[in-house]
Each structure stands twice: as structure tokens, then as C-alpha cells.
Image (spheres, helix red, strand yellow):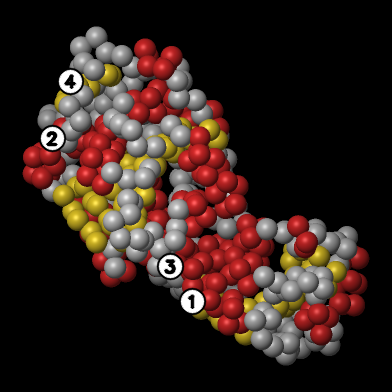
Amino acid sequence: MTEVSKITFANSSRVRKGTVIVIVGEGLKFGERAMALGIDALVRRAAKIVEYSGKSMKVLDILAPADTGIDRLIVVGAGKAETLTGQDWMRLGGVAMGVLSGVSAATIVLERPDSAGLDPNFAADFSLGLAMRSYSFDKYKPSKDENGGSAKKLPAAITVLVGDPAAVRTAWKNRSAIGEGVTMARDLVNEPANVLGPVEFAKQAAGLKSLGIVVEVLSEKQMAKLGMRALLGVAQGSPRPPRLVVMRWNSGKARERPVAFVGKGVVFDTGGISIKPAGGMEDMKGDMAGAATVTGLMCALAGRKAKVNAVGVIGLVENAVDGNAQRPGDIVEAMSGRTIEIINTDAEGRLVLADALHYTETRFKPKFMIDLATLTGAVIVALGHQYAGLYCTEDGLAENLRAAGDATGEGVWRMPLSPEYNKLINSKFADVKNTGGRGAGSITAAQFLKRFVKDTPWAHLDIAGTAMGSPQTEINRSWASGYGVRLLDRLVSDFYEG
């Protein structure tokens, strides 16, 4: 699925060669399989020298341990094993993968370092951590380094030794599908904009038909007929035509209303006539991360055959500058009939979402809608890169998102939606203007979107700080994190599936 070429699950205690990883608890507690290797005394001697105690996520690396036949023994600390969650086991997998750089094959003795057996779901979480940490986007790097050798990492073949391989394989099927969705989202965000335009992105999404997803791609002409003038106004400065992609996964109850996810897909954002400063503008290839997340989520739901009816809608445009580009002061009529005064052409993502949300709500009448967008720099000022900003019209949906965020480590922080902010986006010449200025910038962006949602429970996730340039973690070393795929998959599986 990523740089890990193969993960194999087996039940054996015979490990006498190559690179071996064992899990220990705090205080150097060993599980039965690790004890059977006869390496506990060796580890204790080495640990004493470097004052290693098996604390959570800490590593002890022993090269060519004497009298073992093992080339390299890596000890990964689990801390207090009885408190570990699935997210903790995933992080442990990431830590394990992080010390396997350059290793073509390894064996991992995976067990709880106490008398309790390891839940197969936790073993699958650990393996997902392995796969996610191994991801790298190096397709444009040279195939040879300066010395003539391979410049790219070789994928590793990993054997994970567990108590019940069959049960772990069953759990891994779902985790692997989720990992594929995260990988797809990361790949899309990392891809340069000269390669991935709206048409090319739409083709990538259309490839999900192979998983049983029904995909429709709406052309510029079709969107014009529907009255999507807000979205089309953003696209008019680029020679690259816009697209609206609808992805439907129908595996829930017949005639049951779907859950809906809407993504902002600005494949590159110059800011338009309100042009951005040059410094850091290259990062604007990632301004389609919301659409990437929705696409990756649909991939994950279909890959694990989720028992749900789900719709993913992504608006794909490029915000460029030419003589036909939208101007500050222009007024456009959205599909909903509301008129919008353009104050700043760099506040373009909300225009794309205004039409995409209205289209999704009126066509599919979903149980709820969640949109994702790298919408504002203001959310980074407020929350940094640790949480996505959450705006929501229904407490139950907001609480479910919070719980899913806690479970996956993809955190959300609820921000206010309040009528008091509406005056900042009231326009003298139209129903609404597309920006309220610097103050409360992320909030007024959400208030703007809310005007294009009727009665459907709705949540907006501002992922500007979490989807790209995000913190490097145990399970991610990529500029594009794939944030939101695991969060929303967990939301579906815990609260809306079956």
C-alpha cells in the first residue's frame, strides 16, 4: 500500500537472524515470546548502560547482539501496556518503522509486554502505523544518487509475529483500506499543480469506479446550466477548466439518506487579482487538501466495504490571474440564488464550497454534511497545527466528531458560530460579501458558508493547519498528512454505519 511492500502475519517464536524488533513495557517487562528468544538478559545489560527503561515510544538499538544469531535487535518501549489505546499502538508501529530505514526485511515480535493477550485490532493498528510511517513522496527524485546507487528507499518486507494471525489478518483488511485512503490523500496533496489540474484530479477520482463507487464528473457547461456562478467565477481566470466530481458509495440500507462530505479543491491558489506574496506560494498546490481528503475517505469506505450510503462532492478549480480573472467588487449569483460581493479574490475557497454545499444538500438531502477546506490562515493563528477548526450547527454531530478525533489523534476544536459575526460579512451591494476582514477570519468564513446551508445538520472543518505543512509525528513524515481520512472514517464506523 505504501513503501512497505508486504506485511505478513505469522505465529512463530523461532527468530534467529536478520533485524528483529521486540516490544517491552516500562521497567523492562517482556512478553512470553520475547522471553522465549532468550534476549532479556542481553537487553537488560544494554539498557543499564544507556539508562533505558522501556518508556513509551523510546527505542533501544542493539547491533549484532552476541550469541543470538540476530543481526540487529531493536527494542521499542510501550510504557504501561494496560493503558495503551489503538492510537497508541499505531504510534508504536510508526516508531518501529522509523528505525527500519534501509532495512529490506524485518521480523517484529508483537505482543503485550504483560500476561494479557494482544487484541487483534491493536495488532492491526500497529501495522497501519508501520505502513503510514513508511510513506514517502519521491516520484520526482532522481533514480540514482551522486555515487550511482539508488536514491530511493527500498520497500521493506515485514513479518509480524502475533498470537492469532487469522484474526489479525481480518482486522488488517479494514486498516489496510484506511491506509490506502490516507495514501491517496497524501499523494494528491503532494502532487505539483502543473501535473494535477482540475481535469487530472477528476480522472484520479474517477479511478475509484474500480472499487464500486459511482462517479459523475460535471463539466463547466453543466455547472453553468445549474447556476454555479460562484464556483465558476473562481475558475474564470485560468485556462484549465473546472470540474465538480460526485462520488457515491451505496452499501447501506435501501433508500436510507446518505451521509455527505464536501471538499474544497483549489488545485493552485495564486490569490487571483488579490495576489498572494511570493514567499511560500509554492505551498498553494495543497489548497485542494479538502478535496483530497474526501476522495481518500471514499476510497477507504469502499475499500473496507463500509455499510453506509455516502456521498463525496469535490469542487475543482484553479485560482489564477489573467485578463478574464474575477475582480474585487464583482457581484456573482450563487446556485442558491444568493448574491455575493467579491471583496478579495483570495477568499475563493468559500465560493467553491457555497455552490458545492447547496448542490449536495438539494440533490441528495443527506443526514448531515461535513465540508473540509484549507480555508483560512486565521485558523492557524488560533489553533496552530494541532487541531482543525470545527464549526457545527448541531451539538450531536460536533460531539461525534470530537470523539472520532480523540480516538484517531486527528483532533478538532469547536469554534463559535454566532449571529453577532454576520454583520462583518453583510454587504452594501449584495446579500453577502466574501470576507469580513482580518478579525475573526476563520469564524466569518464559516458564517459565510452557513448562509448556503438550509436545514441539514452541517459541520465545517478548517484544515489549513493540519492537512499540509503539518507536524511530523510517529506516523507521518510527509508534508501532506492525509488529515481527515481516519477521522471521518472513524466517525462513520462508530456512529453512522450498519
Pointer 1 with pointer 4, Cβ within 8 A = no
Image x and y of residue 14, in percent: 72, 90
> Please, what secondary structure does the residue beneath circle 2 have?
loop
Which mark is on residue 330?
4
Which mark is on residue 304?
3
* Sooner in the amino-acid sequence: mark 1 or mark 3: 1
- Residue at horizontal 24 percent and vertical 9 percent from the top: 428
* Sooner in the amino-acid sequence: mark 3 or mark 4: 3
Q: Which residue is mark 2?
A: 227
Q: How many neighbours does mark 4 have within 10 angstroms: few (below 14), some (14-19), or many (20 or more)?
A: few
Image x and y of residue 47, in percent: 87, 67
- In space, the residues marked 1 and 2 are separated at their CA atoms by 47 Å
- Residue at horizontal 77 percent and vertical 63 percent from the top: 81
Q: Which residue is mark 1?
A: 5
> Please, what secondary structure does the residue beneath circle 4 have?
loop
Q: Is residue 17 above or below residue 229?
A: below
- Left or right of 369 in this view: 89: right
Which mark is on residue 167?
none
- In space, the residues marked 3 and 4 are separated at their CA atoms by 46 Å
Image x and y of residue 478, in percent: 49, 54
> Please, what secondary structure does the residue beneath circle 1 have?
strand
- In space, the residues marked 2 and 3 are separated at their CA atoms by 36 Å
